[in-house]
Image: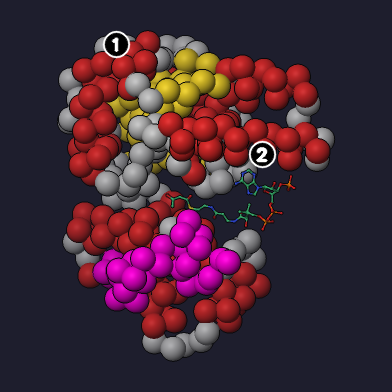
């Protein structure tokens, strides 16, 4: 099962990053979004990122020309029909993802591999929306995709071993390290990372320290590039909340309850860097 053409659903932060890495890795890449303006913006941002890499000597003019020629965009989902692999990177919302997989399963060849970049929704449940659950798999990239080396590979209950192997090969061809994890809420990264972020929010809520000091303590005390509150803003507070809710509901343990302060920030539309206001302001 050799993948040559990759379709990507959703031109947000994650979809854009996956499209950049996919085209830079030599795959014919088709990026879909409902909104033409978002697609244009994505192409501009990818172009700017490639130019930045060029100025640092991390890529060449030829490689950029090749990557750009391999990257196409569309607002027509039907154009996905002949892709070898489709990576869905839409909003982290069950009903949106279920509808996309249902539609793709109607549109695509039975051989097309359907992967989701979901950060926490069950791959088995997503696969159950399709005609052929053996072709459905999880491929969880980290943000920012061009920088982060990890892809979590999640095998649903019905995922075929050939499909799993094929996405592992794609991840490796993209220069990533692939780890296999079970289809359990949060998979591996978010099972560990999100409760840590949630606990940092509880620490702020309880007045243990200021947000700046909590972040400094974790950055200097555990040698991570961002403190947990800064990282929550980077990921998006709505995404953090939705992952905590999946952990809480899926694992049924009160230790995963989202901190009331996190809920309050999301209710106030303080979503983090994406809308310039989270725990910190981004003027
Ligand atoms: N796209 C491409 N490259 C980027 C980038 C982007 N969006 N953002 C930063 N970079 C590159 C920069 O160009 C720079 O490259 P060089 O080293 O070659 O110069 C490098 O990354 C470092 O960037 P900066 O110097 O601008 O800034 P920094 O040193 O503060 O690093 C960071 C920025 C890479 C984001 C770093 O802070 C970091 O690694 N943070 C933690 C990120 C993290 O934990 N991500 C995982 C989140 S969890 C997740 O994604 C899963 C989920 O489901 C929620």
Ligand 1 lies under 8 Å from the Cβ of mark 2 = yes
Residue designated by label 2: 49
Neighbour class for label 2 at 10 Å: few (<14), some, many (≥20)?
A: some
Residue designated by label 1: 109
Residue 137 location, quadrant: top left
Could you tell me if the residues under marks 1 and 2 are in contact, i.e. CB atoms within 8 Å? no
Specify whether 15 is left or right of 177: left
Magenta stretch, residue numbers:
255-283
Question: As rendered, which of 53 and 196 lies closer to the eye?
Answer: 53
User: Magenta span has 271?
Assistant: yes
Residue 183 location, quadrant: top left
* Residue at 56% over, 32% down: 43
Quarter of the image that includes the N terminus: top left
Distance, label 1 to label 2, CA atoms, is 33 Å
Q: Earlier in the sequence, mark 1 or mark 2?
A: 2
* Residue at 53% over, 70% down: 281
Render colour scheme: secondary structure
Spot the residue most to the front: 37
User: Magenta span has 184?
Assistant: no
Question: As rendered, which of 7 and 47 lies closer to the eye?
Answer: 47
* Residue at 26% over, 31% down: 100
- Give the x, y percent position of residue 165: 43, 22
């Amino acid at each position: 099962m050799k993948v040559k053409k990759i379709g990507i659903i959703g031109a947000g932060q994650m979809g854009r990053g996956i499209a950049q890495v996919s085209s830079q890795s030599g795959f014919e890449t088709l990026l879909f979004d409902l909104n033409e303006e978002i697609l244009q913006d994505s192409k501009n941002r990818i172009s700017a990122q490639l130019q930045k890499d060029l100025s640092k000597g991390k890529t060449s003019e030829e490689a950029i020309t090749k990557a750009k020629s391999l990257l196409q965009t569309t607002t027509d989902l039907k154009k996905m029909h002949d892709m070898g692999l489709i990576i869905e990177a839409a909003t982290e919302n069950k009903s949106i993802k279920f509808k996309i997989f249902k539609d793709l399963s109607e549109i695509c060849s039975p051989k097309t591999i359907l992967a989701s970049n979901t950060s926490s929704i069950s791959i088995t449940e997503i696969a159950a929306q399709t005609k052929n659950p053996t072709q459905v798999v999880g491929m969880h990239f980290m943000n920012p995709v061009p920088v982060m080396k990890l892809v979590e590979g999640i095998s649903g209950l019905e995922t075929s071993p050939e499909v799993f192997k094929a996405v592992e090969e794609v991840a490796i061809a993209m220069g990533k390290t692939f780890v296999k994890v079970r289809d359990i809420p949060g998979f591996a990264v978010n099972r560990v990372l999100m409760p840590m972020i949630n606990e940092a929010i509880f620490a702020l809520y309880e007045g243990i320290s200021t947000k700046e000091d909590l972040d400094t303590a974790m950055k200097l005390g555990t040698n991570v590039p961002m403190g947990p509150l800064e990282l929550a803003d980077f990921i998006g507070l709505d995404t953090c909340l939705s992952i905590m809710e999946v952990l809480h509901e899926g694992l049924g343990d009160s230790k995963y309850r989202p901190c009331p302060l996190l809920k309050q920030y999301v209710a106030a539309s303080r979503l983090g860097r994406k809308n310039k206001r989270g725990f910190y302001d981004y003027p």
